[in-house]
Amino acid sequence: MIIEQALLPVLPGREDEFEWAFDQARTIISAVPGFRRLSLTRCVERPSGYLLLVEWEALEDHTEGFRGSPAYDEWRRLLHHFYDPFPVVEHFVPVLEVG
């Protein structure tokens, strides 16, 4: 399992619009082979900041399968205009889980 992590800096004042667009976009990513689950959470201290965590079966499911698909073009169309600056996306492997 791979966990994709991105801190999403949404333009202030566009949070509601972003959340609506993300609700549409989740159906795109969830249909991609290798997708397991995602969570989107909003920052308490910076209300225009969001944390996206996506679980994939393998790194390539995200980097090649999703990003190389026509579905990614639609994802980008729905979401990328909300970010300033553009988020850094990193991938992690689980080491320890409690609970």
Image: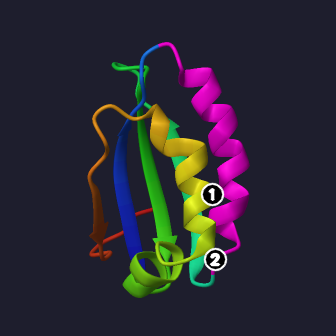
Q: Is residue 82 left or right of residue 36?
A: left
- 14 magenta-colored: yes
Q: Is residue 57 left or right of residue 21?
A: left
**Which of the image's four quarters has the N terminus?**
bottom left
* Element type at mark 1: helix
Could you tell me the amino acid type at mark 1?
Glu
Residue 65: image location, x then y, percent = 51, 83
Of the pair 92 and 87, the residue shown nearer to us: 87
Q: Which residue is mark 1?
A: 74
Residue 25: image location, x then y, percent = 66, 52
Mark in the foreground, 2 or 1: 1
Residue at 32%, 75% in the rendered image: 94
Q: Which residue is mark 2?
A: 32
CA distance separating discs 2 and 1: 13 Å
Q: Which range of residues does the magenta coloring cover?
A: 13-32
Q: Is residue 38 left or right of residue 28?
A: left
Above or below for 48 versus 13: below
